[in-house]
Image: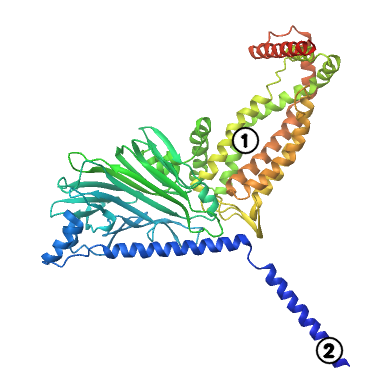
């Protein structure tokens, strides 16, 4: 009997286990979105494989180098390459490379095409400090530089498919690499690379010699330059947010191709430089003789940040090179390095304009206050970057404290007048126009400006907005750690979530939480005074209710939108609000004396009222006009 019972229990156990397994398989089966993503990924791989086969077939169809002395093969080459058949007869007509490097850059240039196929920054690492992977701007065919060669015998050749002859020499301390696509012993198209010691800027000249009978000079040569940008930072979505094409055009104007979307295109004229900018690194092509026309295109490659983790953007530039007396002669430069304000500014080529510091007053604050001050703290004193941010924040907030004081003083004055304003409201509740007039008289007589509390707050707004531009662009913060944040230029994740929350993300950052708490207490501390200082006006929104809502909305917005932002900005906001709370506490309890303010206002009431300011006069006129229009509308309605 016991044996049967055991068998029954076993059967029940197996059934339960089987049911649990079925449930687990059901729960872990891929969602429709995941299936679609996997399908898209397979289609992309198939497309890439098909393209690779097509490219391979195209390359195979090109003529190979001729055997020396083989006149028949040379004649065959001339049928496909025309005047450039000579280049295929040289020993350099093979897949070989030349490497040049200095303390900062390592460049690998291919014979085929004559352009850079690898560009490595020797001082910077990918993703995080200690990863051991150097930042590679160009590698594995992610970039092409090609000239469409229109020949006098009606051929269209691509320089990227033809072989250049390399010649490397040292002139002083500079390495000079000449890559020549030859049509004869002394007829050639030349790319010249000049690499100086300890420099990110590479001289890059394109010129032709003796090709006026080979190339059709009726139309410009089409320079095609493209780059598929590798991801280099911790967060692919955050890095991608700042990746864009920047350019200088029409001598002194600057613009960019939209950061997001597919096939975003601009066609500026007289272009002096084109920058393929990632978040913290850039490849910039500049020219002494501007490109008369251009076509610049950007495509977003990050559709799903869980799948698209290798590349961020696909950049393309089409830059026609004009002939002069039948020849090409362009002196240019290639900058391949960090998007660091001090580094870019030093080249005196306006490269620093690619850093988004903000327009107008916001840019001025960043350029003349934030950058010099933070640069001094982070380099001269030699502080930890986190400590530098804290000291930087303290200095900015102390400098703004007189404005904070004036704002609070105005609130205190309005708070003293609140009973009088409430009395006027009750007395003239049936005559809003009269109530407004008497209220303005009271302000004037008491020597109180109702706008005085708003103006200081408005002055602080540009500094707040400037900080939103400054910290995401601060290269100094990249891969610098502070407390639990391993990279102040990226989010400071302390918990990795097993799921993704829309708008919030799949991790929890701590500095935004601290900043949100500080904002909550700051708004809680100040909202009561603001509500008591400013009584609700008839026909106006209830500010008290709005402030109550904002007390909870502002911290929530901080939590949501700053969770994936750089920790440096969240740290700045946290310290900024802490200091403001401290300053407000000192002003409220030790500096502003409500009794003295009340006595001063009562004394002012006994004096002759001051002549209304132009603003007050204008405000009075506007109110009278509104009241007249309202009365006129009511009369029409009665008729």
Q: 440 or 594: nearer the eye?
A: 440
> Sequence order check: which comes first, mark 2 or mark 1?
2
The answer to which image quadrant residue 88 occupies is bottom left
Q: Left of 109 or right of it: where is 314?
A: right
Q: Which residue is mark 1?
A: 397
Quadrant where the C terminus is found in the figure? top right
**Protein image colouring:** rainbow
Q: Residue at x 75, y 22 (%)?
A: 413
Residue 305's place in the image compared with 466, above or below, is: below
Callout 2: SS: helix
SS state under label 1: helix
Compared to 465, does 259 lie above or below?
A: below
Residue designated by label 2? 6
Residue situated in front as seen by the camera: 147 or 332: 147
Residue 490: tell me if it is visible: yes
Give the label on residue 598, or none.
none
Q: Mark 2 vs mark 1: give the one in front.
A: 2
Measured as percent of width and height from the top left, residue 311 is found at: 47, 56
Relative to residue 59, is residue 200 depicted above or below? above
Instruction: Say whether residue 604 is left or right of residue 266.
Output: right
Is 305 situated left or right of 438 in this image? left
Viewer-closest of 24 and 589: 24
Using the rendered image of the protein, determine whether residue 402 is visible from the camera's viewpoint: no
Question: Mark 2–mark 1 contact, CB under 8 Å?
Answer: no
- Horizontally, residue 167 falls left or right of residue 606, namely left
The residue drawn where x is 52% and y is 60% is 40
Q: Position of residue 301 (x, y in %)?
A: 49, 53
């Amino acid at each position: 009997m016991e044996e049967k019972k055991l068998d029954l229990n076993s059967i029940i156990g197996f059934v339960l286990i089987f049911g649990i397994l079925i449930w687990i398989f059901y729960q872990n089966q891929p969602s429709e979105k995941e299936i679609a993503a996997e399908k898209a990924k397979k289609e992309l791989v198939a497309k890439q494989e098909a393209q690779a086969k097509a490219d391979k077939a195209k390359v195979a169809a090109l003529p190979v180098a001729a055997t020396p002395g083989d006149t028949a093969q040379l004649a065959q080459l001339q049928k496909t390459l025309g005047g450039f058949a000579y280049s295929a007869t040289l020993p350099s007509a093979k897949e070989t490379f030349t490497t040049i490097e200095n303390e900062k850059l390592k460049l690998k240039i291919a014979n085929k095409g004559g352009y850079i196929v690898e560009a490595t920054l020797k001082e910077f690492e990918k993703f995080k400090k200690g990863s051991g992977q150097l930042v590679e701007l160009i590698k594995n065919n992610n970039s092409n530089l090609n000239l469409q060669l229109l020949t006098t015998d009606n051929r269209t050749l691509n320089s990227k498919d033809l072989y250049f002859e390399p010649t490397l020499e040292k002139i002083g301390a500079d390495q000079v690499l000449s890559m020549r696509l030859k049509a004869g012993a002394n007829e050639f198209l030349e790319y010249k690379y000049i690499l100086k010691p300890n420099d990110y800027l590479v001289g890059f000249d394109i010129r032709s010699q003796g090709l006026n009978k080979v190339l059709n000079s009726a139309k410009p040569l089409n320079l095609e330059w493209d780059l598929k940008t590798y991801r280099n930072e911790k967060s692919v979505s955050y890095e991608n947010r700042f990746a864009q094409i920047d350019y200088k055009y029409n001598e002194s104007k600057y613009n960019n191709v939209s950061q997001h979307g597919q096939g975003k295109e601009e066609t500026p004229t007289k272009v002096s430089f084109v920058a393929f900018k990632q978040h913290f690194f850039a490849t910039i092509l500049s020219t002494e003789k501007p490109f008369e026309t251009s076509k610049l295109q950007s495509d977003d490659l990050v559709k799903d940040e869980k799948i698209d983790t290798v590349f961020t953007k696909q950049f393309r530039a089409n830059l026609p090179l004009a002939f002069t007396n039948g020849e090409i002669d362009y002196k240019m430069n290639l900058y391949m390095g960090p998007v660091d304000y001090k580094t870019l500014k030093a080249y005196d080529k306006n490269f620093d304009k690619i850093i988004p510091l903000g327009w107008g007053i916001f840019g001025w604050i960043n350029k003349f206050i934030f950058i010099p001050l933070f640069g001094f703290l982070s380099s001269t004193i030699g502080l930890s970057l986190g400590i530098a941010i804290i000291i930087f924040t303290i200095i900015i907030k102390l400098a703004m404290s007189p404005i904070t004081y004036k704002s609070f003083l105005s609130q205190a004055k309005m708070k003293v007048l609140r009973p009088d304003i409430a009395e006027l409201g009750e007395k003239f509740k049936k005559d809003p126009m009269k109530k407004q007039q008497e209220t303005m008289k009271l302000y004037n007589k008491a020597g109180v400006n109702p706008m005085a509390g708003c103006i200081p707050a408005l002055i602080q707004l540009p500094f707040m907005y400037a900080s939103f531009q400054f910290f995401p662009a601060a290269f100094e913060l990249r891969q610098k750690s502070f407390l639990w944040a391993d990279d102040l230029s990226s989010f400071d994740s302390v918990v990795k979530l097993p799921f993704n929350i829309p708008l919030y993300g799949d991790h929890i950052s701590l500095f935004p939480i601290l900043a949100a708490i500080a904002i909550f207490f700051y708004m809680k501390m100040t909202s009561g005074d603001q509500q008591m200082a400013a009584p609700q006006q008839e026909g106006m929104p209830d500010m008290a209710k709005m402030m109550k809502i904002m007390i909870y909305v502002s911290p929530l917005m901080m939590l949501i939108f700053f969770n994936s932002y750089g920790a440096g900005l969240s740290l700045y906001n946290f310290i900024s609000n802490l200091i403001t709370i401290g300053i407000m506490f000192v002003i409220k309890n030790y500096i502003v004396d409500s009794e003295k303010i009340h006595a001063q206002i009562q004394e002012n009431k006994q004096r002759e009222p001051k002549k209304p300011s132009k603003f007050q006069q204008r405000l009075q006129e506007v109110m009278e006009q509104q009241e007249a229009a309202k009365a006129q509308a009511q009369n029409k309605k009665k008729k």
